[in-house]
Amino acid sequence: MAKHKNKQHPMMWTAAGLCVALLLAPAYPAQAAGEADHGHAETEQGAEAPKEQEKIALTPEQIAVAGIKSEAAAPAALATSVQFPGEIKFNADRTAHVVPRMAGVVQSVSADLGQQVKKGELLATLSSSALSELRSEWLAAAKRRDLAAQTHRRELRLWQEKVSAEQDYQAARTALQEADIAVQNAEQKLRTVGAEPRSKDLGSLEIRAPFDGVVVEKHIALGEALPDNASIFTLSDLRTVWAEFVIAPKDLQDVRVGEAASVSSAAFAGKAEGTVSYIGSLLGQQTRTATARVTLENPDMAWRPGLFVSVDVVTRMSDAAVTVAADAVQTVDNEPTVFVEVPGGFLVQPVKLGKASDDRVEVLSGLAPGTRYAVENTFVLKSELGKAGAEHAH
C-alpha cells in the first residue's frame, strides 16, 4: 500500500526531500554547488533527476582539526607479490660453535647467556695438561735455537779469523736452521689449538670470541672436565638474520634470487625490506618444496630467531596511469569510494579499482590524474556521511 502511495505523489516526496537537504546543509553533506536548483528545475519539468555527487561540507579549520590530508592521484609502478609463511633463523654464515680444541678442566667462565661480546673477548679459561706439554716443547725448542745461534756466531767469527775450518761453520749454520724450524713447528702446534706460545701458566687455554656477536647457547660450568670436541658456546652475529621460507613447485618459476621482498610479523608492526638471497636447487624429499631465504639487516635486534613471519616476494612490476593510496579508499553503498577535495569540503566519488600493491591501488575509472583526494583520516569523512544519511532517514 505504501508503495502505491509513493507512486501517486512523486512531487510531494521530492519537495520534502529538498527541504530536509536545505535544512541540513550547514552541518552535514550537501549536494554539490548549483545542483539543488538544477534538480528542482528538472523536477518541475517532470524529468527524472540524474544521480548527483554528495558533498561533505567542511571548513578549512574543521579539516585541519580532523587531520585530513590530501594528495593528487598519480601514476605509479605497482608491484605484484606472492606471500609465503616463514621463520627468522640465525645467519649460519655468521654463527659459530665455539669448541676448546683441547681437553681440559674449566678454570673460569667469563661470558654469560645473551651477552654481547666483541671479537677476541675472553669467554672462558681451561687448564689442559696437553697444552702444558706443547708449551714445554716450544720453550725447549726456543732454548735450543738460542744455543744454536750462539754457536753459529762463534763459528762464524773463528772461520773469518781462519782459526777453525769452514766445515765447522757450515755445521753450526745447519744446526741453527734446524733449530729455527723446530721453534716454528712448536709455535704452529700451539696456534692450531688457539693458544699463544707465551703464558705464565703453561696449561692455561683461553677461549676467545671469534667475532662480534651474542652468546645464544652456553654449555659450560666451572670445574667441568671437557673433551676436545665439546661445543661450549654458540655465538651468533644478530646484526643480520635469515627469513627462511619454502616455495612450492608451482611458485618456483615466479621467484628468483635477487628479487625484492618484504618481511613482516603479526607480533609487531615493523617491516623489513630485503632481497631473495638463496633458493635451494633441490626439493625436499618429504615436503617437495624448495627452501629459500631473505637476508635481513637487523641493527635493533628486533628480528629474533624463532619469530614467525610473512615473506612477500615481488614477482612483477606494472605501470598504472592513475593510482591512489590504498588507505584512502572507503566503501560507500557497497562501492569503492574516494573523497575528492573541492572548495568547501569533499565530494563523494565512486571509483572502479584495478591492480593493487601493499600501499597503492590502481583506479580504472572515476578519477582523473592530478585530482586531489583525501588520503589520511578518511574514516572521518565516511562517519560524517553516515550521520547525514541517518538524519535524512528520519
Image (cartoon, helix red, strand yellow):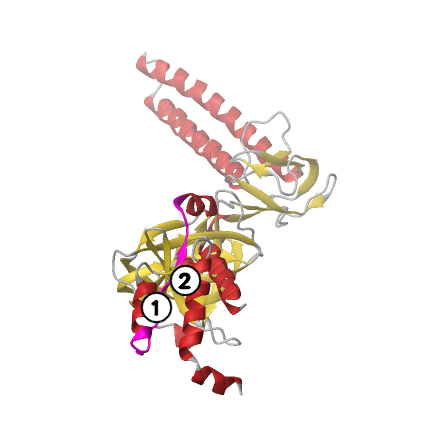
The dot on residue 235 is none
Judge left or right: residue 119 versus residue 278.
right
The extreme right residue here reads 223
Instruction: Name the amino acid type tagged 2.
Output: Val
As rendered, which of 170 and 94 lies closer to the eye?
94
Instruction: Name the amino acid type tagged 1.
Output: Glu
Secondary element type, mark 1? loop
As rendered, which of 4 and 228 lies closer to the eye?
4
Q: Which residue is mark 2?
A: 329
Ranked by sequence position, the earlier of labels 1 and 2 is 1
Q: Where residue 251 sits in the image (x, y, percent)?
A: 40, 73
Q: Where residue 292 sits in the image (x, y, percent)?
A: 44, 64
The image quadrant of residue 12 is bottom left
Q: Are marks 1 and 2 in contact (CB under 8 Å)?
A: no
| Mark 1 crowd level (few <14, some 14–19, many ≥20, 10 Å Cα) | few
Distance Cα–Cα, label 1 vs label 2: 20 Å
Q: Range of the magenta residues?
A: 43-60
The dot on residue 52 is 1
Does the rendering let one see residue 80?
Answer: yes
